[in-house]
Amino acid sequence: MSNHKDWPSRPVSQPRPGYFLARLIRNGPFIPARIIHEGGLWSAEINGEVFEASADPAMAPRVFTIWHSAQEISEVEFDHRMKALRAARPGDPIRSPREPINLVALPSIF
């Protein structure tokens, strides 16, 4: 994951639909997120949870949270991350995105 300073700039007040990687808290896992604009309605999906839609993106929960703080990714990467989320076992950090990753508690890869 690159440093956020390397991310391309985007207009702050004009969100676009797309796919993103987000963190809900500092040192938490990166999780899949997306901004959806369908049928004139804006909504957000974070880690598989879809939030209420609104005609005004500023009134659609989490749309600007994603737009202002997440890194844009491809649809292929988003789909891969969603598949990994569905396959994650209990205790996997992606299952608890509101908790910092505890490296000591993770199983060894060796």
Image (cartoon, grey):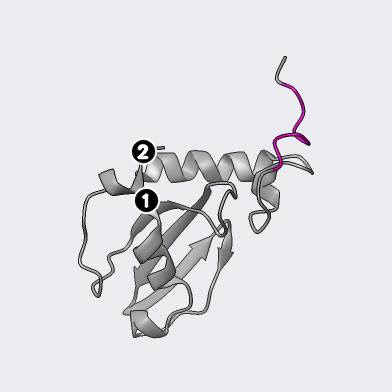
Residue interval drawn in magenta? 102-108
10 Å crowding of disc 1: few (<14), some (14-19), many (20+):
many
- Residue found at x 66% / y 44%: 101
Q: Is residue 32 left or right of residue 84?
A: left
Q: Is residue 69 above or below residue 109?
A: below
User: Is tag 2's residue or tag 1's residue first in the polypeptide sequence?
Assistant: 2
Answer above or below: position of 55 versus 86: below
Residue at which label 1 appears = 71
Residue 62 x/y as whole percent: 47, 72
* Location of residue 14 with respect to 55 vertically, above or below: above
Q: What residue type is labelled 2?
A: Ser
Residue depicted at x 43% and y 80%: 60
Give the x, y percent position of residue 90.
79, 44
**C-alpha span from label 2 to label 1:** 9 Å
> Which residue position is annotated with label 2?
2
Q: In this view, does 4 lie to the left or right of 89?
A: left
In the image, 23: left or right of 54? Answer: right
Which mark, by number, is residue 93?
none
